[in-house]
Amino acid sequence: MTKAKTTSPAPRLKALYKDTYRKELQAELKLENVHQVPKLEKIVVSVGTGKSKDDKRHLEAVKNTLTKVTGQAPVERQAKKSIASFKIRAGMGAPIGIMVTLRGNRMYEFLDRLVNVALPRVRDFHGVGVKFDKTGNYNLGIVEQSIFPELTFEETQVTHGMQITFVIDGEEPEHSRSLLEKFGLPFAKEGGRR
């Protein structure tokens, strides 16, 4: 006798994208084909270890933060190049960064929590920056990890920031911005404070 697989329901934002947002974006951006509509490919959450790369307490705090916030085990990144002024040798020694790559359901669940729970907890928040790279990917810097409710007060004693990169399959940065606005990412008003 084989066990039946139980499938959990699709994340809220993933279902909204498939059922509603994709059609709306195709109409708004005047795209002929549904395959031209921008889509989120992956989200990369990374933390640079910087000067504290030899501090085991800091590395453990960063790994714990990324594991709790993303629900996935982080990967340590080694230096790819030797840089004498930073005292770094390629592939040797302590990691220079720790990262997690999210795809599929976990990616949409993380985005939902980030937009609806974490960002509203930022003090004096006026929206996120509007700069996209040439290919339409978006980078968001978080100054302090304490905005995530998954972390306890004790886990936020060693403070560190994180970089969140949204890798988007789209034709232009304006298309990528439209997609992220549909998902609810609050961009700063033009000409206003950030």
Image (cartoon, rainbow, N blue to C red):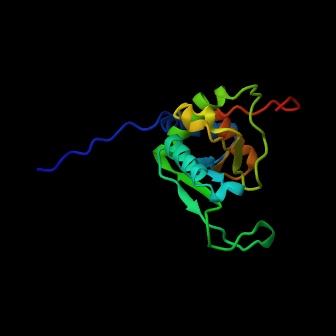
Please give left or right for residue 106 compared with residue 116 in the image. Answer: left
Check the image and name the residue furthest to the right. Answer: 191
* Frontmost residue, 35 versus 109: 109
Residue beneath the point at 81% across and 30% down: 189
Residue beneath the point at 53% across and 58% down: 75
Q: Is residue 124 above or below residue 14?
A: above
Q: Is residue 37 above or below residue 19?
A: below
Q: At which x and y percent is residue 174?
A: 75, 44
Q: Quadrant of the C terminus?
A: top right
Q: At which x and y percent is residue 87?
A: 75, 69
Q: Is residue 130 visible?
A: yes
Q: Is residue 1 above or below residue 187?
A: below
Q: At which x and y percent is residue 153?
A: 56, 31
* Frontmost residue, 91 versus 178: 91
Please give left or right for residue 10 compared with residue 121 in the image. Answer: left
Q: At which x and y percent is residue 175?
A: 70, 45
Please give left or right for residue 69 compared with residue 171 in the image. Answer: left
Q: Is residue 12 above or below residue 38?
A: above
Residue beneath the point at 68% across and 44% down: 161
Q: Is residue 168 visible?
A: no
How many numbered dots are placed on residues in this image?
A: 0
Q: Please tell me in which quadrant of the rendered image residue 80 appears.
A: bottom right
